[in-house]
Image (tube, rainbow, N blue to C red):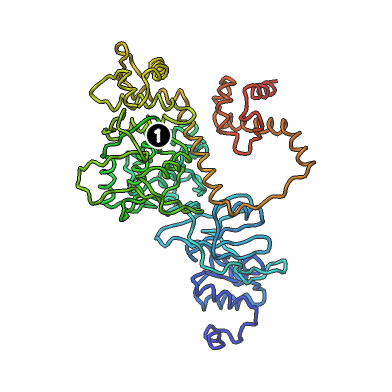
């Protein structure tokens, strides 16, 4: 070893504990290093700071020779030069937040009060990750930053020590990746610097304020762009997000231009290719007759059909059929039902079988039975229940259109028109050229008694979704699709859908991070009493903050009625709102706050 140091131009072997051997070892692993005095670059040896970092042994030895005894450690430049990024955690609270965000690495360095968690950059060319704050006391160190290497001395007298000595974990998907084409500003064109941050691609995500709309929608489009979405599908999703989250929404032509621009670029995260055999199997399952009996059967068949749509995106071949690995909340969202209903259907249906349980971030895997050896066009009796009578049933032979999928989503949950009413409309849409159906025929189709349909039929006629052509006979109006969309808006179904997505996201994050949650001590009697007595003040303060946030994002609500303001506040109260027995904010509470502000 002494000869190798002499080859580097050093007359003496470094003393034990010297930072040079540790720096050379890090450089051997591909890390660009430089000498530090405490936590700052040495002035004489590194005039350009972290930009002098290198992986060349002779240059590293020269920098440490010039630094002399002032070098108490070494720094590692983060970003592309070293192939790593580091999550810098300053205290225990920031560490808990990093755990909640899933930022856990197999290579972790203790800094005394906090940690450095190392992540490996993707190997693709042109990938750049910007440094930024992820949360209070939680920083991502990437391009243009450095960290103190393990083994270095801390200015307080302690040291940086490795506590998990594995390989740096792959960069999590939650840390936004920006390609160089997006991260670089055009020469000579002024504008705000692009800063990466966490981005939600759901319509139920946080509001997007004016000044950030174009850039945020471009990033969302980049996340949505994959090898399976067509330009029309990407545009439709981006337009929905624009209407739901942008305040005020961008012009539709500008949104379409963003989608077209992103669609012309290679996908950042292309989905795995779906084989033609999978596509053919899904087409076969979708074409088989589907006897449905009663409201429960219709719900279960809606779940099965949503599963077929998911198979077109994520399906894999299996000796007994097709396997699908997806979380149950996404499945429930597509079927317009609840996750517990989907779980029950998977257990009860003879067409599905769970072959692998989910855990942590891994979703469960469900097998869809496919008779591979059957001849094409062979009819296989399908049902969403184990035993089904074909009495009072009808085959759903019409392939699921966009209108039928909308009606399926309107069957369940708040803001929707209900199971019976949606099932009636579904039956009339499927009758096709028949045009009209009698009440007795609709009842036989749904497995109901004709008298039980009087109330839902009357409601649909009064709502304008059905026309009574003659006594006991009903048909759809000519502009039925437009009327359905109007009914969705009046019933606030899109808002209910966004709230369901937001709730599913919270439940999903809570489940994935359940093992990272620390147990809390039981509150003392005095603390419990104080918390209970402060409920009115805490509730009023939380409502005031929600109203202020609403007026900031949607100024037009200052002139709206109290009831409209109260209805909109559900998007701003958050999960920590002190609900108590009253639940969400009430009109009288909002009115009292507004009267106080006006006074």
Using a 10 Å C-alpha cutoff, classify the residue at mark 1 as few (fewer than 14 neighbours), some (14 to 19) or many (20 or more): many
Label 1 sits on residue: 299
Residue drawn at (33%, 53%), measured in percent from left and top? Answer: 316
x, y percent for residue 117: 57, 61
- Closest to the observer, 27 or 399: 399
Image quarter in which the C terminus is found: top right
- Closest to the observer, 243 or 141: 243
- Closest to the observer, 344 or 312: 344
- Judged from this view, the residue extending furthest toward the top is 471
Q: Secondary structure at mark 1?
A: helix
Relative side of 578 to 34, left or right: right
x, y percent for residue 300: 39, 37
Q: Is residue 553 above or below residue 65?
A: above
Q: Is residue 320 above or below residue 402?
A: below
Residue 257 in sight: no
- Judged from this view, the residue extending furthest toward the right is 526
Residue 361 in sight: yes
x, y percent for residue 288: 26, 39
x, y percent for residue 481: 34, 25
Relative side of 52 to 233, left or right: right
């Amino acid at each position: 070893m002494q000869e190798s140091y002499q080859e580097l131009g050093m007359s003496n072997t470094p003393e034990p504990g010297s930072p040079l051997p540790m720096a050379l070892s890090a450089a051997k692993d591909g890390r660009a290093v430089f000498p530090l005095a405490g936590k700052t670059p040495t002035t004489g040896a590194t005039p350009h700071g972290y930009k002098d970092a290198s992986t060349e042994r002779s240059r590293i030895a020269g920098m440490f020779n010039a630094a002399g005894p002032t070098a108490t450690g070494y720094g590692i430049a983060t970003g592309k030069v070293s192939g790593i990024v580091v999550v810098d955690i300053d205290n225990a609270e920031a560490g808990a937040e990093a755990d909640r965000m899933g930022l856990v690495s197999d290579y972790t360095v203790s800094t005394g009060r906090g940690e450095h968690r190392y992540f490996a950059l993707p190997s693709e060319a042109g990938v750049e990750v910007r440094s930024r704050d992820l949360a209070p006391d939680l920083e991502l160190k990437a391009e243009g930053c450095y960290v103190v290497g393990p083994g270095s001395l801390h200015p307080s007298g302690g040291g940086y020590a490795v506590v998990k000595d594995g390989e740096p974990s792959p960069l999590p998907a939650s840390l936004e990746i920006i390609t160089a084409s997006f991260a670089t500003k055009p020469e000579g064109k002024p504008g705000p610097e692009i800063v990466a941050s966490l981005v939600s691609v759901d319509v139920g995500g946080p509001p997007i304020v004016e000044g950030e709309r174009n850039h945020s929608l471009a990033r969302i489009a980049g996340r949505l762009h994959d090898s399976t979405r067509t330009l029309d599908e990407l545009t439709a999703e981006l337009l929905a997000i624009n209407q739901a989250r942008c305040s005020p929404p961008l012009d539709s032509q500008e949104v379409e231009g963003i989608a077209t621009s992103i669609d012309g670029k290679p996908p950042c995260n292309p989905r795995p290719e779906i084989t033609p055999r999978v596509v053919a199997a899904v087409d076969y399952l979708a074409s088989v007759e589907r006897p449905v009996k009663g409201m429960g059967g219709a719900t279960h068949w809606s779940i099965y059909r949503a599963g077929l749509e998911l198979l077109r995106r994520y399906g894999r071949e299996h000796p007994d059929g097709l396997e699908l690995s997806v979380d149950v909340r996404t499945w429930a969202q597509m079927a317009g039902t609840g996750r517990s209903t989907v779980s029950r259907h998977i257990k009860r249906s003879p067409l599905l079988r769970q072959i692998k349980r989910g855990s942590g971030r891994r979703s469960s895997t469900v097998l869809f039975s496919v008779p591979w050896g059957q001849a094409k066009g062979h009819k296989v009796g399908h049902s969403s229940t184990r035993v089904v009578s074909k009495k009072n049933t009808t085959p759903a032979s019409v392939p699921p259109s966009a209108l039928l999928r909308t009606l399926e989503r309107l069957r369940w949950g708040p803001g929707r028109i209900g199971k019976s009413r949606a099932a009636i409309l579904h039956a009339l849409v499927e009758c096709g050229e028949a045009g009209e159906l009698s009440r007795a025929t609709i009842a036989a189709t749904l497995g109901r008694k004709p008298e039980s349909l009087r109330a839902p039929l009357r409601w649909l006629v009064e709502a304008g979704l059905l026309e009574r052509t003659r006594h006991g006979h009903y048909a759809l109006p000519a502009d039925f699709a437009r009327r359905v969309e109007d009914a969705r808006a009046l019933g606030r179904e899109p808002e209910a859908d966004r709230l369901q997505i937001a709730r599913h996201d919270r439940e999903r994050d809570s489940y994935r991070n359940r093992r990272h949650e620390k147990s809390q001590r039981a509150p003392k009697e005095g603390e419990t009493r104080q918390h209970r007595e402060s409920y009115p003040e805490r509730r009023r303060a939380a409502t005031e903050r929600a109203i202020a946030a609403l007026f900031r994002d949607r100024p037009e609500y200052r002139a709206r009625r109290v009831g409209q303001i109260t209805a909109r506040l559900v998007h701003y109260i958050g999960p920590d709102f002190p609900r108590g027995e009253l639940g969400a904010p009430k009109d009288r509470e909002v009115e009292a706050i507004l009267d106080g502000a006006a006074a």
